[in-house]
Image: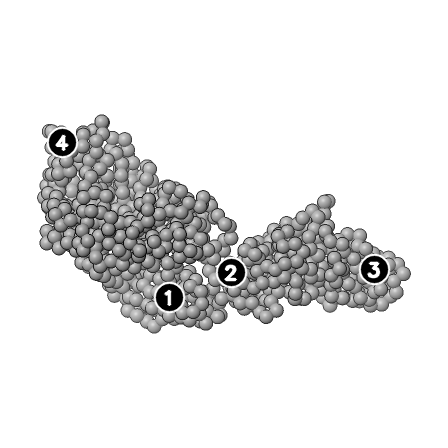
Amino acid sequence: MRQAALLLFLACALLPAAQYRAFWADAFHYGYKTPAEIDRMVEDLLTAKANAIFMEVRHRGSAYYLKSLEPPVNWEREYLPGFDALQYLIDKAHPRGIEVHAWFPVTPLWGGAAPPTAPQHVYNLHGPSAPGSEMWMTVSSAGTVSNSVDPGHPAVLKYLADVMVHVAENYDIDGVHLDYIRYPETADYGYNPTALDRFRRLFNRVAESPGADPAFGEFRRRQITELVRQVYLRSVAAKPRIKVSAALITWGDGPRTDQEYLSKDAYRRVFQDWRSWLEEGILDLGIPMNYFRDTTNSGFFDRWGEFEKNRQYNRGILVGPAIYLNSIPNSVSQVRRALTPSSTGNTPLGVCFYSYASTNTLDARELPTVPNAEFYSAIGEFFAQPDTPPVLGWKVRPSLGHVMGRLEVTGGPAWLADGAAVRLINEDDRSESLGATDSSGFFGFVDRRPGLYHLRIERAGQVLYRSIQQQVRPGLVTVFEARLRADDFGGVVPRFAAESLVNAASFQPGPQSAGALVSLFGRNLAPRTEAAATLPLPTELAGTQVLVRGRPAPLLYVSPGQINFQIPYFLALLLGPTGQFPVVVRHSGMESEPLTFTLGMSVGIFRFGDGPAVFHAGDFRAVTPASPARPGEYLALYATGLGLTTPMAEDGRPGASQEPLNRTATDTLLTLGNRMLIPTYSGLAPGLVGVYQVNFQVPADLAAGRTRLVLLVGGVASPAVEVEVR
C-alpha cells in the first residue's frame, strides 16, 4: 500500500495543468441504455475526475439517438423505444463540466447471424444480397464478403459522412469520434467490384486481383483519408468548435521512425495513415489505442507513446490505455508514463480509457478483477483534483481557415466528378495548393492563411471550372460549390472519330488482324504527345491506355488526336479468325465510350517516302525510281497485319533475330505484275514489333518498268503499290 501511495504521489507531480481525462463507453456493456445508467455513469466520471465521455452512439448501423439517418437500436431489451440516449447524456453531462463526444464505429455494418429486422437498415438495402453496384460491402481477395462497408465504393463514402455530420448538425455534442475508420484486418479486403472498377480507372490498372500492387494499397489509404477529410470539414462547417477525433491502430511494437511506421499494420494492413491525418490537420485529436498488458508488453506501450507524443503536428494526442487488460496498479503506471513528456519534451493532451464499464482484468500475475468502482476511485485519487479539458488554441483562437466544396455534374457518368484535380490559389502571393475530388465529388483544404482565394478544377490538365474569389476567415470553412454539365467535359473526355481504327500501313478501315499495327483517331485521346522509347512496347504512355477487350494494348505513340498501337495476338486465340472486340481509351481517371471493332485480316504495306517499304535485300537500300529493283534480285517488303506467327509472337515484343524466327502462320503470296511469287521468308521482321518482313525474288524475265505489287495473306489482298523494275 505504501508503494502504491508513493506511485500516486510521484505521478501527480508530473501532471500537466490541463488535460483530457476521458473514457470510451462502448455499446457491449452497460452505461447509457437507460436514464438510470446515464445518471450513474455521470457520477462515476466525476468520481474518476474525468471530464469527457466518448459514447458509442452508433452500433451495427443502428442509432442510440433519435435524430438519425439510420434506424434506432431495436434488439436490446434495456434500450427503450423512443429514448434518446445521446440527448439525455448531453443534458446530464454538460452541466457537470463533462464533454460528450459521439463515437461512431464507421465501417462495420452488421455482426449478427441473421439480418437486422428494420427494413431500412442499410444492411438490408445494400448488404451481400443487393444487386450490382447496390452492394456496398467490402470483399476479400478470396471472395469473402465482409460485414463492413467498402469506403472505396462511391455511395459509401458520402453515406457515412452524411450519417456522422448529421449528428453534429442536430446535437450539442463536443466532438465526432471515428472508430473502425479502416479496412477489416482479418483478410486482404477492399475488393468490392464497384470499388475495384474505380481503382482500375483512376490508376490505369486491369488486373482482376490487384494483390500486392502498391497502387492498390495507396488507393485504399486514400479512401479512408478522404472520408476523414470530408467528415472533418463538414463537421467544422456545421459547428466550428467541434472536435473531430479518431481511435487509432497501434498493433505490435511501436515504431522508432516515420519510415518504420510505414511498415506497421495501421498503414500497411488496414490502410489507416493516421500520422498524415494529424500532419494535415484533418483530426483535432488522435487517440491511439495503446492496448497492451503491462506485465508482458510495457515496452510496446512506451515506444508507441514516444512516437505519438512527438507527432502531434499542432493538433493533439490522447493516449488510450486498455484498462480492461490491466490491474489497477498497472493501469495507473501506464497513465503516469503516458502523461510523462517524451524524450524531446512533448506532452499529450491527456488520456482516454477503454473502457468505462470494463476497467480491470483477472490475471494470475496481477491482482484479481475488482469492481469498476474501485478503478474510478483509484484513478480519481491519482488525478487528485478535477480538471477542465485543455483549451485547443486552433479552435478557440484560430489563426487559419479552411476550404471545402463539391463538384456536382449533371448528366453523364458519375465518375466525371471523381478524381478531378482542384487547385486553390491565394490571390495575395499566387501560391497554390493541389487537391482532388473524392468519389462523391467532395474536396477540401485545411489550415489556410486568411485572405482572398479562388479555385480551378481540372481534368487532363485542362481547366473546366474557375470559381469567383472568396474570403477565407480564421476558424471558419469557406464553401466553393462547382456545378458542371456533362457537356462541359467535351474537351477532355476521350472520344472516337467516325472511322477511327485503320491499318497503320495502308490506312484502310474495316477488320484488323491480331498483331497488326493500327492507328486510332479521335479527340482527347491522350493529355499530351508521347512516343515509346523502349522495347517491349509499354502499355501506358502519357498516362494513357488502350484497353482491348479489357486488356491494355502495346502502344507506339499517343497524342490528343491519334494513337498508334498493336492489336494483341490473344484476340485471335479468344475469337478465332473473326469476331468483334471492344476498345476503350483511358487516361486522367476518364474513359471513352467503348467502341466495337471486327477482328479479321487487313494487310497493309508500309510507305517509305514516295514509295512502298521495299528494300534491296543485299544492302537494304530503298527501292525507288533512282534505285530500282533489278530482275533476279532479292527484295524485302515491310508490312503489317499478317496475323499469327509460329512460334507465337508476344504482344509488344520484337520479332526474333535468330531461329526459330516468328514465321507467319497463314499462307503468304505476292503478285508482281501478272506473276505469282512465293516468298522466301514471311514473318515478323527481326527486332521490330508488329512489322512483318516478306522476302522474295524478282523474276529474271520480268519486263522493266513500273509494276503493281500486291501482298496476299490467307486470300486477303493488300492495297496495290507500284514498284520500279529495270
Question: Which mark is on residue 676?
Answer: 3
Q: CA distance from mark 3 to mark 2?
A: 45 Å
Element on which disc 2 rests:
strand
Question: Which mark is on residue 3?
Answer: none
Question: Which mark is on residue 586?
Answer: 2
Q: Residue at x 30, y 57 (%)?
A: 120
> Circle 1 is placed at which residue position?
407
Q: In the rendering, at what x and y percent does residue 431 appear?
A: 36, 64
Q: Residue at x 29, y 42 (%)?
A: 307
Q: Nearer the viewer, mark 4 or mark 2?
A: 2
Element on which disc 1 rests:
strand
Element on which disc 4 rests:
helix
Check disc 3 and give the amino acid type.
Met
Task: Tell me the quarter of the image containing the N terminus.
Answer: top left
Q: Earlier in the sequence, mark 4 or mark 2?
A: 4
Element on which disc 3 rests:
strand
Q: Nearer the viewer, residue 287 or 180?
A: 180
Where is 648 relative to 458, above or below? above
Q: Earlier in the sequence, mark 3 or mark 4?
A: 4
Q: Earlier in the sequence, mark 1 or mark 4?
A: 4
Q: CA distance from mark 3 to mark 1?
A: 65 Å
